[in-house]
Image (cartoon, helix red, strand yellow):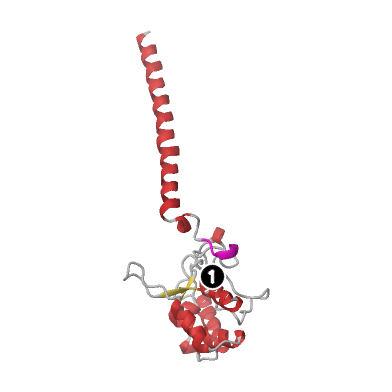
Amino acid sequence: MSSTRTAVRTTGVAVRAMLIFTLVLGVGYTLLVTGIGQLLLPNQANGSPLADDKGSALIGQSFTDADGAALPQYFQSRPSAAGDGYDGAASSGSNLGPENADLIASIEERKTAIAEREGVSPDQVPADAVTASGSGLDPHISVAYALLQVPRVAEARGLSENDVRALVESRIQGRDLGFLGEEHINVAELNLALDDREGA
């Protein structure tokens, strides 16, 4: 009889502890962290949305037409191997090694196409212009790749190269923590700034 009472008591304690910890850790902690995020970093907590529901600043976008041709009035992102391109549900790289013949061929093909589009020699095309990031979702390009595109974008928009270059330079983001990685530019934010400038 006493063993039955002990089992019932132990079960009751376990159920009460589970309910308390579920409320404290599952509900209370979640609400606390969400509240702190909304109070201190609301933009980041909500996914870093771009203006006018134009996506997220954290996920790269394609600035091409229906046939995949680069829109001349926009800065182009780096390639994406995520699904059909910049697919957040299929984040991935190509998983091809540096000696893979298909990867080498696609890099050379991209390099030739970009050099022709930008009016430069293939050896002036930066590496990030022809290679996808590990996630396939990187929204950034190098400063070198952005500056390479300035003449084309300026011509397509009827702006001076100096004005477009100044806008690019104003959007440069520094190294993470001041020393990690390289300076970079968020392509979607840069293109939105261009649209805003023309609409002003």
Q: What residue type is labelled 1?
A: Ser
Please indicate whether residue 65 sits to the left or right of residue 137 in the image.
right
Q: What element carries label 1?
A: loop
Does the segment drawn in magenta span residue 53? yes
Query: What residue appears at the point 47 percent right and 58 percent down from the top-left corner?
Result: 43
Q: Toward the viewer: 56 or 129?
A: 56
Magenta range: 49-54
Q: Position of residue 114 (x, y in %)?
A: 55, 84
Query: What residue appears at the point 43 percent right and 29 percent down from the top-left corner?
Result: 19
Q: Where is residue 138 in the image (x, y as percent from the top left)?
A: 48, 68
Q: Is residue 23 above or below residue 188?
A: above
Q: Quadrant of residue 116?
A: bottom right
Q: Toward the viewer: 3 or 51?
A: 51
Q: Residue furthest left?
A: 179
Q: Position of residue 32 (x, y in %)?
A: 41, 43
Quadrant where the N terminus sits is top left
Residue 54 seen in this snapshot: no
Q: Label 1 belongs to which residue?
A: 80
